[in-house]
Image (spheres, rainbow, N blue to C red):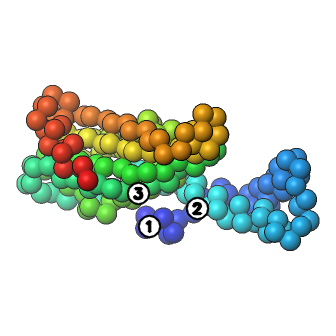
């Protein structure tokens, strides 16, 4: 699996005409004039966007870690500030932020860029932030069998900032703690101190 531009949701591609038709109907139902110039290509643009922002459905997130390597390193490895964009499954509104992943290998490591690819595979679908956090930690645990994994996800949710309670700038922070990080407060503290700005 390549970067985000390298894969698309094949189901969207296969159903392009149906999706375009339904986007046009939604525009009509909210009171828009779908014949006006600015909206003529909107159904096609939305469909192309869906191919990209929902590309995670076409990828097995476990495969996003790719080839792993034998390595005797058993100290903390962190990739922080991985920017992600996702869609809230409750409102289909965007949310976005940063993912910080840390793990203590037990003989297997993944290429550092693969942690960003794992993040893409998990976030490019309808999601909730809590599930993203747990899925990344669980996949890391299942594929690499590390001594411990810790994942912290920060997110700004448009469903909270632009509608409902309308609190722009508020951030949600979630964490998932596995293995050594759960049992060892010093390991948790090291990870948290290293991901701070």
Name the residue that disc number 1 marks.
Answer: 3
Q: Residues within 10 Å of mark 2 (few under 14, many from 20)?
A: some
**Relative to 72, is 86 on the left or the right?**
right
Query: Hey, which quadrant is residue 137 in on the image?
Result: top left
Q: Which mark identifies residue 45?
A: none
Residue 144 at x, y = what percent?
24, 47
Question: Distance between the Cα atoms at labels 3 and 1?
Answer: 13 Å
Residue 90 at x, y = what percent?
62, 36
Residue 2 in view: yes
Q: Residue at x 10, y 35 (%)?
A: 186
Residue 15, compared with residue 132, is above or below; it is below
Residue 6, compared with residue 73, is above or below; it is below
Name the residue that disc number 2 marks.
Answer: 52
Q: Which mark identifies residue 83?
A: 3
**Local secondary structure at mark 3:** strand
Q: Residues within 10 Å of mark 1 (few under 14, many from 20)?
A: few
Residue 148, compared with residue 45, is above or below; it is above
């Amino acid at each position: 699996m390549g970067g985000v531009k390298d894969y698309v949701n094949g189901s969207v591609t296969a159903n392009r005409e149906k999706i375009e038709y339904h986007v046009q109907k939604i525009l009509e139902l909210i009171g828009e004039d779908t014949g006006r110039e600015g909206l003529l290509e909107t159904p096609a643009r939305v469909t192309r966007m869906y191919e990209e922002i929902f590309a995670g459905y076409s990828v097995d997130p476990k495969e996003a870690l790719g080839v792993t390597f034998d390595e005797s390193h058993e100290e903390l490895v962190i990739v922080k500030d991985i920017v992600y964009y996702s869609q809230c499954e409750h409102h289909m509104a965007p949310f976005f932020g940063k993912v910080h992943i840390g793990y203590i290998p037990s003989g297997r490591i993944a290429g550092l860029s693969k942690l960003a690819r794992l993040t893409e595979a998990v976030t490019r679908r309808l999601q909730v932030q809590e599930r993203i956090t747990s899925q990344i930690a669980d996949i890391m645990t299942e594929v690499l069998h590390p001594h411990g994994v810790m994942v912290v996800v920060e997110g700004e949710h448009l469903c909270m900032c632009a509608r409902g309670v309308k609190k722009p700038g508020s951030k949600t922070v979630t964490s998932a703690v596995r293995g050594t990080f759960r049992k060892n407060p010093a390991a948790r503290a090291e990870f948290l101190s290293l991901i701070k700005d």
